[in-house]
Amino acid sequence: GQSLEQPSEVTAVEGAIVQINCTYQTSGFYGLSWYQQHDGGAPTFLSYNALDGLEETGRFSSFLSRSDSYGYLLLQELQMKDSASYFCAVRDGGGSYIPTFGRGTSLIVHP
Amino acid sequence: SQTIHQWPATLVQPVGSPLSLECTVEGTSNPNLYWYRQAAGRGLQLLFYSVGIGQISSEVPQNLSASRPQDRQFILSSKKLLLSDSGFYLCAWARGGDTGELFFGEGSRLTVL
């Protein structure tokens, strides 16, 4: 089976940088994804890392270390609208692509 | 472009009543389809996934069932709801290839009383 660990809550102030970590245990690892979910809404895709290294998309970056079974989501120049839950998800093997999600990290951005 | 819709958005049902949530995807063919449930303040629990018409895999034993009568239609059902079935139900689809991206529907919030 798969298991993922991420902090339950992170707080930061506007304009700051915050890092949300995710460690995983899985067999047949193919990649690590990140999703954002605002209260009452559906999750939306942020990023995907299949290879080691940093992927940058605007203010958001995601990092993966396969040897350490570890990744993180980096949010820069925080804005109030970034307050949301962030989930990491690992992709299982095979063509069926069965993603398993972590329990989510609630990010609270203060003015 | 691809879109995904699920309905109803909100429903309140008594214990023991049946359930039917429907999800349709447009703009793609032969998608992988998923039903997730999210309890308040919790992560996403995979309930069912389907790689093709009539092909359903269940991840957790429960009183729910799923069906895929058409390529782009995924239905979640129950004959008799339990209190513990309350939650936020999300349908999602994924395209083939190594994109690692799921596309979610708007969600259906179920309250069982």
Image: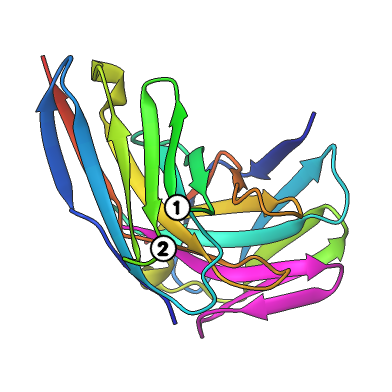
The x and y percentages for residue B111 are 41, 55
Q: What residue sits 63% from the left and 51% below the top?
A: B92
Q: Residue furthest bottom?
A: B61
Residue matched to label 2: A66
Whether residue B50 appears in magenta in the rendering, the answer is yes
The x and y percentages for residue B75 are 71, 61
Query: In the image, is residue B63 above or below residue B110?
Result: below
Whether residue A53 appears in magenta in the rendering, the answer is no
Query: In the image, is residue A49 above or below residue B15?
Result: above
Query: In the image, is residue B59 above or below residue A71?
Result: below
Report if the CB atoms under discs 1 and 2 are less than 8 Å apart. Answer: yes
- What kind of element bears circle 2? loop
Amino acid type indicated by mark 1:
Asp
Pick the residue in front: B57 or A32: A32
Q: Which residues are magenta?
A: B42-67
Residue B112 seen in the current view: no
Residue matched to label 1: A52
The x and y percentages for residue B74 are 74, 59
Rounded to the nearest whole Å, what is the CA distance between mark 1 and mark 2? 6 Å
